[in-house]
Image (spheres, rainbow, N blue to C red):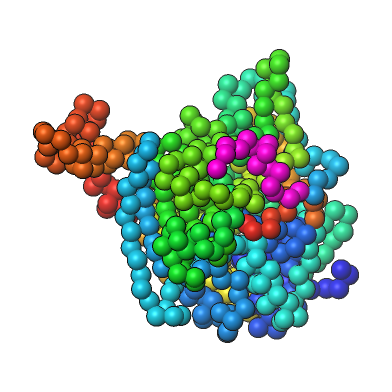
């Protein structure tokens, strides 16, 4: 690695690989440094990718990208002790009309790395960057063990766990309040069982958000032959169950255990998720000689119903490449922030800034699911003395919380979403 | 599906274990800590209490999620990634 590069990209995840992809279009000699033994071997996500940036920038991506299933069914479910409340939206779109698909991130990144390598970019694996080298506050290279590699620009694409950025004071130390831990298990169930049990056609997928009193937030994504299930564990909230046990807790719920019967777990994974949204966005995700992209810059959007990471990573990579292209030598790539604003990425994050507060409110995982299940249980339990909705509501909620507080909280929530 | 313990669940995931730990626990800093939130929040269950009530940590099943570094209120965890190529190897992710 004695050759001199124009740009060094630290991290071969969605943001890093995308930046390299777009830099190649501008003619930069770029190298991606990835600590894993293969692209994707250190990456974890929930299970869904939105198509719009791929449609825009990756011609013919549908031909060979590792698409598992097109998301046809969107579900939001509340799991109580033994019950489940479902809200479902089924989309019937023409082929090629679906706007998201389920995937495995490790496999998707192997594909993305190939697209990058096709543009003669080197993706070097097994390389852990230990330090970003600065001289007079200008980033000029990276240190890998005893080796040094220099370049005009360093792209920091280290992901959600911002070890390097924090080490160099580019970003404050992340607070436990601002994170959740995504804990996931991939279960092999077979295509037929998945189609049958989840009411799906061969290419059709389900994306399901879960809220549960025992485990907090969670998700289910159906793949071709596998199901990914996971929990968004909030260390400061979920105190009655330890993180290592939450997956089992989810799996033993009667609803899930039926769906997943005979399934064979094949992988257990975990990664932190930055949950603070707008307040966690770097004020200045660039400096002389460097730009921060993707999760590392705080570019992740949770709207309360959908989570977007990969698409924002791709967009930020594209804008970082453009910023480098537009910045005269020796100047700060401040145009990066301008581009993020112009593309309304910053505005979108700001628009959803209150969501993280809702998602870190313990009551939405404990109290509300309980109320909703109790009310529905009363409504649908028929005996000689049926109850009105109002009576059921009062029985479920009354005494435990003031109705005024509940209404106030609900209103605040609705206004923030 | 039968219930699985975390030790068993970790055998599903592929690891390339390096000879030296990438995370170092400064146990002297744990003495004054009442929270011990590392124990409850590690998804691999790698932090445990030994007979004397001190925190024990093993790095071999580390999923490299980064949680312990962030939640530790005592800054007792010196966290680094394993050397390039080592550590967890996600096949699905």
Q: Position of residue A413 (x, y in %)?
A: 29, 48
Residue at the spot 31% in from the left edge and 36% down from the top edge: A370
Give the residue at x 47% y 63%: A195
A25 falls in the magenta region = no
Residue A155 higher or lower than B16, as above or below: below
Q: Residue at x 46, y 47 (%)?
A: A258
- The quadrant holding residue A345 is bottom left
Q: Is residue A287 visible?
A: no
Name the spot of residue A250 as percent of width and height, x first: 48, 42
**Quadrant location, the C terminus of chain A:** bottom left
The answer to whether residue B10 is magenta is: yes
Asked which quadrant contains residue B22, the reply is top right
Taking depth in this image into account, of A38 and A356 the one nearest to the observer is: A38
Q: Nearer the viewer, residue A252 or B47?
A: A252
Q: Residue at x 80, y 49 (%)?
A: B16
Q: Which residues are magenta?
A: B1-15
A78 above or below A226? above
Q: Nearer the viewer, residue A367 or A69?
A: A69
């Amino acid at each position: 690695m004695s050759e001199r590069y124009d740009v060094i990209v630290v991290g071969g995840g969605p943001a890093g690989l995308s930046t390299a992809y777009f830099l190649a279009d501008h003619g930069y000699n770029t190298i991606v440094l990835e600590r894993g033994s293969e692209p994707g071997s250190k990456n974890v996500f929930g299970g869904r990718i939105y198509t719009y940036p791929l449609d825009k920038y990756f011609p013919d991506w549908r031909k060979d990208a590792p698409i598992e299933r097109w998301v046809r069914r969107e579900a939001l479910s509340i799991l109580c002790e033994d019950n489940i409340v479902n809200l479902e939206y089924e989309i019937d779109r023409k082929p090629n009309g679906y706007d998201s698909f389920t995937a495995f991130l490790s496999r998707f990144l192997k594909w993305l790395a190939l697209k990058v390598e096709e543009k003669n970019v080197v993706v070097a694996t097994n390389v852990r960057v230990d330090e970003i080298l600065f001289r007079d506050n200008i980033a000029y290279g990276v240190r890998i063990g005893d080796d040094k590699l220099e370049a005009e620009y360093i792209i920091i694409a280290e992901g959600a766990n911002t070890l390097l950025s924090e080490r160099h004071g580019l970003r404050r130390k992340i607070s436990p309040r601002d994170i959740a831990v995504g804990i996931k298990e991939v279960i092999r169930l077979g295509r037929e069982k998945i189609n049958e049990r989840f009411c799906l056609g061969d290419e059709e997928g389900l994306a399901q958000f879960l809220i549960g009193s025992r485990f907090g937030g969670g998700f289910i994504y159906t793949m071709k032959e596998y199901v990914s299930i996971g929990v968004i564990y909030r260390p400061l909230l979920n105190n009655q169950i330890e993180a290592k046990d939450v997956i089992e807790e989810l799996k033993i719920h009667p609803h899930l255990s039926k769906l997943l019967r005979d399934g064979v777990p094949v992988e257990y994974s975990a990664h932190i998720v930055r949950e603070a949204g707008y307040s966690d966005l770097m004020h200045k995700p660039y400096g002389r000689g460097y730009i921060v992209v993707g999760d590392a810059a705080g570019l992740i959007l949770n709207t309360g119903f959908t989570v977007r990471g990969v698409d924002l990573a791709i967009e930020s990579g594209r804008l970082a490449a453009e910023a480098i292209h537009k910045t005269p030598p020796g100047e700060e790539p401040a145009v990066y922030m301008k581009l993020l604003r112009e593309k309304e990425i910053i505005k979108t994050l700001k628009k959803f800034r209150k969501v993280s507060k809702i998602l870190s409110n313990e009551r939405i995982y404990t109290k509300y699911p309980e109320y909703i299940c109790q009310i529905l249980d009363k409504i649908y339990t028929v005996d000689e003395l049926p109850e009105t909705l109002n009576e059921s509501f009062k029985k479920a909620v009354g005494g435990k919380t003031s109705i005024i507080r509940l209404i106030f909280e609900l209103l605040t929530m609705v206004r923030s979403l | 599906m039968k219930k699985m313990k975390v030790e068993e669940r970790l055998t599903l995931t592929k690891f390339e274990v390096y000879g030296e730990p990438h995370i170092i626990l400064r146990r002297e800093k744990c003495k004054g800590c009442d929270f011990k939130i590392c124990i409850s929040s590690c998804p691999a269950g790698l932090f445990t209490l030994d007979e004397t009530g001190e925190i024990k940590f093993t790095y071999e099943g580390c999923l490299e999620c980064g949680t312990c570094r962030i939640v530790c209120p005592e800054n007792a965890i010196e966290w680094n990634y394993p050397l390039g190529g080592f550590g967890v190897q996600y096949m699905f992710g």
